[in-house]
Amino acid sequence: MAYSGISIQSLGNSGGGPSTVADVQTLRNAGVETLGIQIKPTKRKAASNPQITWQQALDEELNWALEMVQACNDSELRKIKVVIRFNDLVSNDAPNSIKMNTDLWWDTYTQISLGFWVQVCQKFVGQDIFMFEIYSEPARVDDRKDSPYPIKSELETFYQEAIDIVRHYNINAYFLLSPGPFGQFTQYLNGFTPFNIIDPIQPYKLMYGFHMYIEHKYTHQGINGIPRPYFYPSPVYDIIKLNQDFDAISSWSIQYGYQIYMGEFNAARWSPNAIDWVKDVILNAKQADFHWSFFAYKPNDYRWDPFYEVTNPNDPVVSWQIQYDLNGSLLWHYLLTQF
């Protein structure tokens, strides 16, 4: 049985505000089955005034996340399955040059990051956690210029150490693996074989994931300098190609016997036909029996917020503007029918 879900963050945008226990109840009433709780100390530190340390930000994030987990696990209500998502692996105190795809990160900061991971896992001892996720968008790429693959051995080592930490504190949760690069699903189409990960306690509780942002220039238009508009369907990517991609991922899942978790998908709120793209993605995920989680409820970037709606749809697409709507967009009302 596959589960539908959504993710939340502690620091919402100016329209939506931060996620709270009341939001968890709202999502429970909407039928949400899994809740991805994103722990983002870097965002919290950047928003603090006066400035707090990165460790203080991590502590505050974990305290907030524990409150959300406890709300999900309320024994008197329908439980929501919790996915702990931690991808802020490098503190703001590290040199600005540190990124997850640099040699310096892999050579120096992986153990520091795993130390942060210990704190995350410790925080949720005794809580019912469906899955733990760390580093779901691995950016490391092979030094061989002709290869699109991440350096598999380094990812294997990192994930093995991460799951060993999880099992020290939790013997029941799934652990999510991502081959990358950047959470894309392309590896599943290009001959990727599963990581050689040993889970001596729960060998059948490894799950593989991806994030659905294809085509990237469609889903991310107007963000980080990507021009707009770009349309779906396009001559390059349409429902036929989308169907083919999901069929290929499903074939990989069946061949190797792993469940698939589509941990993120969305298109910037001014993307033309965004609701059609989301519908096609969810339809394919359901047909393939993938778990899926929409990004996001009250995210800290309004451009992804399903409570923002285009205010001038009759104008040329390139000039579309979006504004917060307390009642939610058409996209949000569609999502409510899918949870």
Image (cartoon, rainbow, N blue to C red):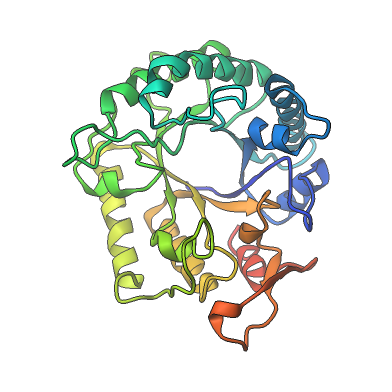
Which quadrant holds residue 336?
Answer: bottom right
Residue furthest bottom as drawn? 314
Give the left or right position of residue 332, taking residue 88 as reference. right
Residue 105 sits above or below residue 318 on the image: above
Q: Does any portion of residue 196 appear in the rendered image?
A: no
Residue drawn 54% across the image and 71% down it:
275
Which of the image's four quarters has the C terminus? bottom right
Using residue 327 as the reference point, say whether residue 283 is left or right of it.
left
At x 82%, y 34%, the residue is 49
What x and y, as percent, mark residue 103? 35, 24
Observer able to see residue 327 = yes
| Residue 223 in the figure: left or right of residue 52 | left
Q: Residue at 80% across / 43% down in the picture?
A: 20
Where does the image place residue 112, in percent across and percent down from the top left?
52, 15
Question: How many numbered discs?
Answer: 0
Q: Quadrant of residue 192?
A: top left
Give percent across and percent down for residue 125. 65, 17
**Which residue lies most toward the left here?**
146
Figure check: 291 above or below 274: above
Q: Residue 88: give x, y in percent of width and height.
A: 57, 31
Q: Residue at x 58, y 52 (%)?
A: 295
Q: Residue lying farthest top?
A: 168
The reply, left or right, for residue 261 in relation to residue 317 is left
